[in-house]
Amino acid sequence: MTIADRTVLVTGANRGIGQALVEEALRRGAKRVYAGTRQPLAHVDGRVTPLILDVTNAEQIQEAVERVESLDILINNAGLALYDDLSDRAAIEQSLAVNLFGPYGVTQAFLPLLTRSRGTIVNVLSVVAFAPLPIVPAYSISKAAALSLSQSLRALLAGQGVRVHAVLAGPVDTDMSRGFDVPKASPESVARAIFDGVEKGEEDIFPDPMSESMAESWRSGAAKALERQFVALVEAEPVKSA
């Protein structure tokens, strides 16, 4: 999958990684970039089509589908991170609504277009999917669930020619991590690495120095091996609906 001459949709496109992904897609020659944001967005490049798209709003998702004629790459980037201590159930529910059910709903809505193009889904996640960061446990829980969603979709959609990539990012210099005092990668470098990983066909993309240090151990580890074994079982004995 190359980005040139492709149609790309990015959720959460107004800032941070999402904004950088829009610019990087344009730089790589994308034919059309749909920029999904909760507030109106203007862009000087005529290849950018803004979409009002709150990923928790089913009506806005459907309206976005009706505006998109074709789609090659869906990037589920919109996310929410809250500082919490698990004492408030609402924080977990809100995190799951945005970080799990958001990409699930958007993916299901655009799946007919992606199946038609034999396209690609990119879910922007975090290394906290592997181990929770205790200052953002609800966020960590939602990203772990979103990783499982990505792995499940990868296996289930392979037969339709749709590829699924999971981006396991470390700290990135965005508004979401502004109060977190650690070395951070720039959104621009992360966007470049994400598209590099897509073009190379990497199932799991580690787009920054911190996450890249974990890449080899993940790809050769027991969890990834088990994922492959389970996929092989499904391929050997396709699941039949009741």
Image (cartoon, rainbow, N blue to C red):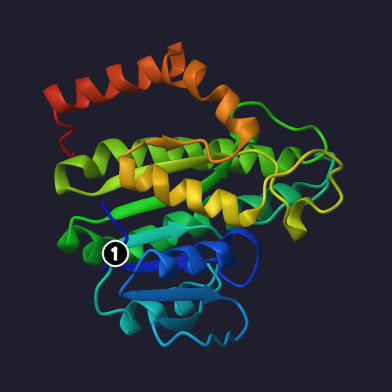
Residue 115 on image: x %, y % = 19, 58
139 vs 146, left or right, is right
Front residue of this view, candidates 90 and 132 = 132
Q: Residue at x 36, y 36 (%)?
A: 203
- Residue ID at (30%, 74%): 31
Disc 1 secondary structure class: loop
Instruction: Where is residue 70? Give x, y as percent.
Output: 24, 74
Residue 140: tell me if it is visible.
Answer: yes
Q: Quadrant of the C terminus?
A: top left
- Image quadrant where residue 139 sits: top right
Give the camera-side residue of 170 and 188. Answer: 188
Residue 191, percent from left and from top: 52, 54
Residue 12 seen in render: no
**What residue is shown at x 40% (from left), y 42% (from top)?**
197
Where is residue 16, by image quadrant? bottom right
Q: Is residue 47 left or right of residue 20?
A: left
Q: What is the three-letter code of the residue carrying label 1?
A: Ala
The image shows residue 55 at horizontal and vertical percentages of 53, 67
Query: Residue at point 61% right, 43% down?
Result: 142
Residue that numbered label 1 is attached to: 4
